[in-house]
Image (tube, rainbow, N blue to C red):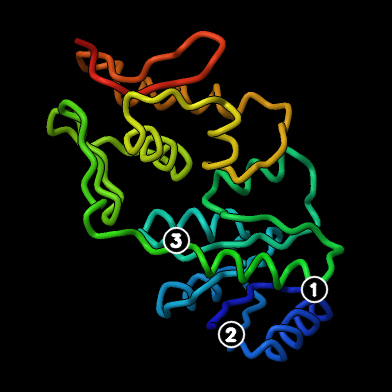
C-alpha cells in the first residue's frame, strides 16, 4: 500500500513511518501542508494520513483543496484536536476518518487498512438521476434543470446516498453513520444543518420539491406524484 503522511512533529512522523514500513507499506512524508498538497496532487496514494495543524497550509485547507480538485483518496486526520466540533469540522472538510493523539499504532494501522479496503465505485453507478436532478459520481458534479449546483463534500455525499435510496426514508442515525462515519450521536445539529443547506441548493429555485422531511423519522428524496 502507498501512503502519504503529512505530519510536522518529528517524533510522531518517525513513529508512524517506522510502523507502516514494518507493515510492508511504502510511505512518503512531508512536514509542510503546501508540500503535502503537491505530493498528493502529483501521485496516487491508497490512503492520506494528515495532521490538522501544519505549517504552510493547514490540514483542513489541504483536504478541501484536494476534494475540490476531484481527489477521492481516503483521508485520515491524525491530530490532537479531539473535540466533537473538531471531528465534525474535519469530516465535513472531506476527511473519512479521525484518530486523536495520543494513539495506539495498532488502531491507526487498522483504520488505515479499513479505509484502503473500501470498494471502488462501480461503473454502472456513475450517473444518478431523479426528475431533472442529476449527479455524476466520478466527476462529482450536480445539475438540476441543466444548472450546475456546487456542493461541499459532505452535502454531495449526503445527496448521493439519498439518490441511491430514492423513495426510502433515511434516519438521522443512518446519515451520521454513512456520511460522517459516526457510530455515536455527537449531540450536534450537523445533519439538520446540512439537510437545510442541501434543500436550499437543490429545491429552492426548482419545482417539484424533491427533498422531503418525514416528521420524527428522517428524510427522503423522491419526485411527488
Q: Can you give x and y, in whole percent of width and height, for residue 22 in the image?
A: 72, 91
Q: CA distance from mark 3 to mark 2?
A: 17 Å
Above or below for 35 versus 168 = below
Q: Decide which of 8, 193 is in the foreground and name it.
A: 193
Please say if the residues under marks 3 and 2 sit with CB atoms less than 8 Å apart: no
Residue positioned most to the left: 146
Instruction: Name the quadrant containing residue 143.
Output: top left
Image quadrant containing the N terminus: bottom right
Above or below for 54 versus 202 = below
Reading the image, the residue beneath label 2 is 28
Q: CA distance from mark 3 to mark 1?
A: 26 Å
Dot 3 crowding, Cα within 10 Å, few <14, some 14–19, many 20+: some
From the viewer's perspective, tell me whether residue 65 is left or right of residue 225.
right
Q: Could you say which disc has been placed on residue 105 in the image?
A: 1
Q: Residue at x 19, y 10 (%)?
A: 225
Q: Residue at x 48, y 41 (%)?
A: 154
Q: Decide which of 66, 219 is in the foreground and name it.
A: 219
Q: Residue at x 69, y 83 (%)?
A: 20
Q: Secondary structure at mark 1?
A: helix
Please say if the residues under marks 3 and 1 sit with CB atoms less than 8 Å apart: no
Dot 1 crowding, Cα within 10 Å, few <14, some 14–19, many 20+: few
Marks 2, 1: nearer the viewer: 1
Q: Can you give x and y, in whole percent of width and height, for residue 60 in the image?
A: 59, 54
Instruction: Name the quadrant containing residue 152.
Output: top left
From the viewer's perspective, tell me whether residue 20 is left or right of residue 200.
right
Sequence-earlier tag: 3 or 2: 2
Reading the image, the residue beneath label 3 is 66
Sequence-earlier tag: 2 or 1: 2
Q: Residue at x 79, y 49 (%)?
A: 82
Q: CA distance from mark 2 to mark 1?
A: 18 Å
From the viewer's perspective, tell me whether residue 6 is left or right of residue 145.
right
Q: Secondary structure at mark 2?
A: strand
Amino acid at each position: 500500500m502507498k501512503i502519504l503522511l503529512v505530519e510536522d512533529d518529528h517524533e510522531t512522523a518517525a513513529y508512524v513511518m517506522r510502523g507502516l514500513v514494518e507493515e510492508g507499506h511504502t510511505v512518503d512524508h512531508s512536514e509542510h501542508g503546501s508540500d503535502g498538497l503537491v505530493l498528493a496532487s502529483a501521485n496516487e496514494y491508497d490512503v492520506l494520513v494528515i495532521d490538522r495543524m501544519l505549517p504552510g497550509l493547514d490540514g483542513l485547507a489541504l483536504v478541501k483543496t484536494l476534494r475540490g480538485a476531484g481527489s477521492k483518496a481516503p483521508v485520515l486526520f491524525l491530530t490532537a484536536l479531539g473535540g466533537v466540533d473538531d471531528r465534525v469540522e474535519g469530516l465535513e472538510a472531506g476527511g473519512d476518518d479521525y484518530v486523536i493523539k495520543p494513539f495506539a499504532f495498532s488502531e491507526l494501522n487498522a483504520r488505515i487498512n479499513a479505509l484502503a479496503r473500501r470498494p471502488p465505485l462501480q461503473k454502472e453507478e456513475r450517473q444518478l438521476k431523479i426528475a431533472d436532478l442529476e449527479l455524476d459520481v466520478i466527476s462529482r458534479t450536480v445539475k438540476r434543470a441543466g444548472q450546475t449546483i456546487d456542493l461541499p463534500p459532505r452535502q454531495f455525499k449526503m445527496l448521493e446516498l439519498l439518490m441511491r435510496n430514492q423513495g426510502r426514508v433515511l434516519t438521522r442515525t443512518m446519515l451520521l453513520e454513512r456520511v460522517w462515519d459516526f457510530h455515536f450521536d455527537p449531540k450536534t445539529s450537523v445533519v439538520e444543518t446540512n439537510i437545510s443547506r442541501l434543500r436550499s441548493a437543490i429545491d429552492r429555485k426548482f419545482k417539484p420539491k424533491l427533498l422531503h422531511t418525514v416528521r420524527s423519522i428522517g428524510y427522503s428524496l423522491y419526485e411527488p406524484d
